[in-house]
Amino acid sequence: MSQEYEQQKILQVDLEKEMRKSYIDYAMSVIVGRALPDVRDGLKPVHRRILYAMYEDGLTSDKPYRKSATTVGNVLGRYHPHGDASVYDALVRLAQPFSLHYPLIDGHGNFGSVDGDPPAAYRYTEARMARIANHMLADIKKNTVDFGPNFDEERQEPLVLPSRFPNLLVNGSSGIAVGMATNIPPHNLTEVIDGICYVIDHPEAELDEICQFIKGPDFPTGGVIMGRSGIRAAYATGRGKIKVRAKAEIVELANGRSQIQITEIPYMVNKARLVEAMANLVKDKRVDGITNIQDHSSREGMQIVVDIRRDANAQVILNQLFTYTQLEDTISMIHIALVPTGAAGKLQPRVLTLRQIIDQYVAFQKDVVERRTRFDLKKAQDRAHILEGLKVATDNIDRIIQIIRASKNEAEAKENLMAEPFWIDQIALLGIVDGSEHFEFHLDEPQAQAIVDMRLGRLSGLEQEKINDEYKELEGRIASFEEVLSCDANILAVVKDELQEIKQKYGDERHTEIANVADEIDIEDLIEQQDCAYTLTHFGYIKRQPTSVYRAQRRGGRGVSAMSTREEDFAKDIFTASTHDTILFFSDRGKVYKLKGYQIPETGRSAKGMNIVNLLELENDEKITAMFPIKEFADDKFLFFVTRQGVAKRVVLSDLQNIRRAGLRALNLNEDDALVDVRLTDGEQNILIATHEGRAICFDETEVRAMGRTATGVRGIRLNEGDYVVGAARARKGAYVLSITENGYGKRTPVEDFTIHHRGGGGMTLHNLTAKTGLVAGIAVVDNENDVMIITDDGVIIRTGCEEIRECGRGSQGVIVMRTGEDVKVISIARTDKEEEEASEEETQA
């Protein structure tokens, strides 16, 4: 240290050490003095000081309200040298019934709302202690708790409140300190007291036994806790997470519409922001089917009404609201509180289990009751001692008066009274508690002072009788106090009795329900399950539409426009599947991709949809050649691949279940080959492969053994030069092979007409082709109960019943199924389930 610094009394210190020490001091100040509650009374210092200041000012529940500004000022001036805003905010929270399960302050005026409305300024509001808060400070003047100096050492303030009920658990607490945070949710008073009493009676009780009484958090705003695992974890370790949902009911109205009525929301959720968030979901079209949202909340209770469109699924919409808004909220439970350690009662933050919180509270209440009982015992003994002296005086009144008159002053009178002996047999009926066997009795200083201070009116016979009665009453109280203090069991019995009194006065029913099993919302729960038609165009535009938009038409109808395509684009593939199905996409390079049906955008009937490159991570110039829906990746199912060059390959479906976002190799292709079709089989099917020039081959699929994903495959059909495969299907017995040509000619040929051959042959005639019919566009194996969708390259779709298409032999040209315009060709067909709908008069005439 330099001489200059020494003269100026400046110390040189290491900056790193000073920063470490100072920051630790600051952190502990925040932890102990501001942010964390005491495990014994569940209060932070500011809350404790507010309640004690109101108690000092006589603002109990039976007194008139007083301006909040007065209370805030008194707290600041006496105990809490911080900002007035922080004190008022703390006072307001203690008065909010939606923040505290059992508010400790009775507020008069605007103290905020669940909508997030701010409270009125403290010059307008009034407050007093709530009735239950009286029990927080009960017997505080009976040496039940320790006191310490306030910030300027002019006053004494309680270091903890007696807290006749377990405030930490029933009202909870939250706060962010330095390096730690606490979030203890509120609980039901009745359940907590029953649990504590059970622990007192059963000191070895396990957590499962305690949880039979304390079932879980109970929030003032109600709601539904989803599952018990998070509660159990928090109670066992001090940390856990729970999901809380709003209480919502779907109500069917007389007009056929439905409503979602929300009557309770998760704890600490801002209702106004919640309603706004729901409205924004509708505005941004993230949730479809909501026509109106209204907040009908009033003094009678909360009610948010969500009107649902007639054709929408209310349960799906409710699941979407749970997922995308705070209608379902996650609450972290962190049981950190300040625990007294050591003889000095120094506070230390600890993570506490439920049992530890209960044990700390029971130990604290045992200490409070013991200290209060000792205080009352001493007070009763002191009063009995005075009464003994008064009894001596009344029984020896003449001698007492003579001694006092003979004394020069009060001090001499006291000395003379203490020096004068009195015979013990004259007061034997009093049963003196000191057990003296001497026959003479000497007054001590307190007794002599009481005699000197006694009024002459106390010398009457009636007053003497009152002294005897009071003394006998004190004898009973003293015996009762001594019995309580005789053992810990008696003290704990008093704790239990007082807790039961609190329960009888303030106990209520649980507000928050607890669901036995967590109802986790899967993404598919947010999407209504719906059968849709999925369409892919030549240029890669994909969309889905409900199958109901396509009306069944008579054979020869003109169809319904399915999309508006760009110039020279045309629809090339269509099938029907559920929105919950998995859609497999097979590219011309032998890779497979997957999407859920609902991930494909739903569009209007004539919209072109979204380009597939926006949904799949395709490589440059890679094109999707086939789409395929499946329910699950089963081990006993197979995918049968057919390529343009007639190559066939069979793969176990489960081999493709780990499809990455960037795709997965499904098969290797020869040069200039491309994938044409994929079929799902059970391993025992006959496969029919059809070509553009009207040839077909049918063989048992087992002739193609199951191969690995990267295998090339084997020859399925031998092609003529220039011919290529247009489709493949499972050849079911009793079904028909429906073939449609480019010019709209079609027919149904019984599957049995196609003889089973070995794979690799040239096949047999499928369709008698002419210039009028054109070449084969596609095939499907159908039943009479099916409909068929036929799509042209200009984006027109017709839906017709399969039974309306004539049954013909393999060598027939077929009949006109769809009238195509000039330069318009059929490019694809798809089988779908029958849709019973009467054709309109216009369609019938057409």
Image (cartoon, helix red, strand yellow):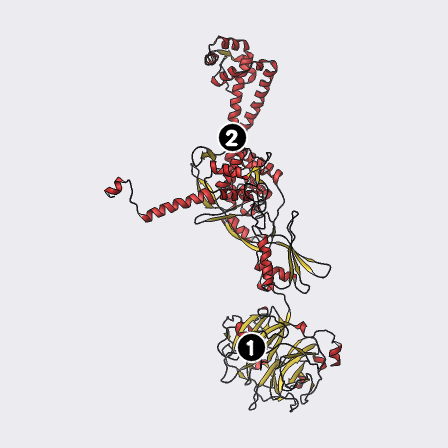
The answer to whether mark 2 and mark 1 are in CB contact below 8 A is no
Disc 2 from disc 1: Cα separation: 85 Å
Q: Give amino acid for label 1.
A: Gly
Q: Quadrant of the C terminus?
A: bottom right
Number of other residues with Cα within 10 Å of mark 2, as a class: few under 14, some 14 to 19, many 20 or more? some
Residue 399: image location, x then y, percent: 52, 9
How packed is label 1: few (under 14 Cα within 10 Å), some, or many (20 or more)? many
Q: In this view, does 314 lie to the left or right of 404?
A: right
Q: Is residue 436 visible?
A: no
Q: What residue did someone put label 1 on?
A: 540
Q: Which residue lies furthest to the left in this view?
A: 3
**Relative to residue 7, is residue 768 depicted above or below?**
below
Residue 466 in sight from this viewpoint: yes
Numbered tag placed on residue 130 in the rendering: none
Write down the quadrant of residue 205 in the picture. top right
Query: Does residue 632 lie above or below 242 as drawn?
Result: below
Label 2: which residue? 142
Q: Earlier in the sequence, mark 2 or mark 1?
A: 2
Quadrant in the rendering for residue 651: bottom right
Residue depth check, mark 2 versus mark 1: number of the one nearer the observer: 1
Residue 282 image position (x, y, % from top left): 60, 62
For the point 47% across and 17% down, which residue is it? 445
Check the picture and name the quadrant holding the N terminus: top left
Circle 1 sits in a helix, a strand or a loop, which is it?
loop
Mark 2: secondary structure: helix
Q: Which residue sits at x=61%, y=49%?
A: 222
Q: Is residue 375 depicted above or below 362 in this figure?
A: above
Residue 673 x, y percent position in the rendering: 52, 84
Among the 4 quarters of the image, the one containing residue 248: bottom right
Q: Which of 209 and 740 is in front in this view?
A: 740
Q: In the rendered structure, which amino acid carries the disc numbered 2?
A: Lys
Percent position of residue 662, x then y? 49, 72
